[in-house]
Image: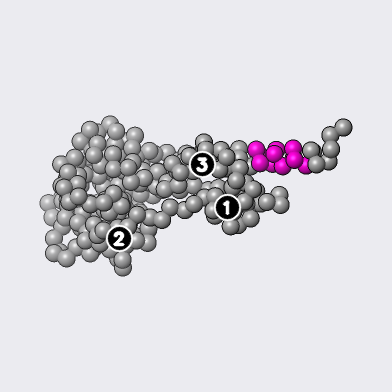
Amino acid sequence: MPSLHHNTTMEKKITFINGALLLLLCLSLSTTTTNAHNITRILAKFPQFSTFNHYLTVTHLAPEINRRQTITVCVVDNTAMNALLAKHLSIYAIKNVLSLHVLLDYFGAKKLHQITDGTALAATMYQATGSAPGTAGFVNITDLKGGKVGFTAKDSSDGEFDAAFVKSIKEIPYNLSVIQISHILHSQDAEAPTPAPEVANLTEIMSAHGCKVFADTLLANPDAENIYTSNVEGGLTVFCPMDDA
């Protein structure tokens, strides 16, 4: 007849297995977008934007864009991206610069030419990160004469427009707008040297908050830990059972 100790051990193992499966499920769900758009798939149809598209993936901006409900992505062609890359910025600075090209509002071609009072100030993903000092994460959009629309970073010191609207690439009113602009938006703050973000140690955090047993189980499962490591920058949610669960 199985001992009480044996039954308790088996129950704990079942709890751990269920917890691990829940963790994997949460990680999988967190990387799956429920929105109707996928920015990298959209841009993959246009080879002239391949460099921009590549860096959306490398900087992990793509999943952040896909999670947004109302957004405008201002893309530039490979020539404009080459000018940015020639500055030899760190990957973290490049992420800040590209974040400045993601507006947290919907601007389709029609709206760009019907801006109230001719000018609008749009917040960007760079501003939303909290990394932008002051209002450096805002972009001025101005409906100019002759049907042109100008773009410039709010912290631009010369007062000149950095880029002009070229054409609409994809519009999903009023969820996603992908537009091409002529040049990269210049921002000294976004281009400034940026230290690498501190990487959170998942198991240490769990252990410190009463989930040490589950953390040890996770360490014993390299596949689960690898899923966390590969998805942490894109954003995820982890549920873990307490030690006394």
Image check: 9 left or right of 120?
A: right
Task: For residue 174, say whether it is visible.
Answer: no
Tell me the amino acid under the disc marked 1: Met
As drawn, which residue projects farthest toward the right?
1
Pinpoint residue 97: horizontal percent, then vertical percent.
Answer: 26, 53
Looking at the image, which residue is at 60% across and 46% down?
Answer: 216
User: Which sits in the foreground, 38 or 212?
Assistant: 212
Residue 229, relative to residue 206: is it above or below?
Answer: above
Query: Please, what secondary structure does the residue beneath circle 3 have?
Result: helix
Looking at the image, which residue is at 54% across and 53% down?
Answer: 204
Cα separation between marks 2 and 3: 34 Å
Tell me the amino acid under the disc marked 2: Gly
Pinpoint residue 221: horizontal percent, then vertical percent.
Answer: 56, 38
Q: Which residue is mark 2?
A: 137
Q: Which residue is mark 3?
A: 225
Give the mark toward the camera: 2 or 1. Answer: 1
Q: Which residue is mark 1?
A: 206
Q: Quadrant of the N terminus?
A: top right
Query: To which quarter of the image does residue 194 belong?
Result: bottom left
Region rendered in magenta: 8-18
Disc 1 residue crowd, few under 14, some 14–19, many 20+, Cα 10 Å:
many
Question: Residue 113 lies in magenta, yes or no?
Answer: no
Disc 3 residue crowd, few under 14, some 14–19, many 20+, Cα 10 Å:
some
As drawn, which residue projects farthest toward the bottom?
134
Query: To which quarter of the image does residue 46 belong?
Result: top left
Task: For residue 214, say whether it is visible.
Answer: yes
Looking at the image, which residue is at 15% across and 41% down?
Answer: 79
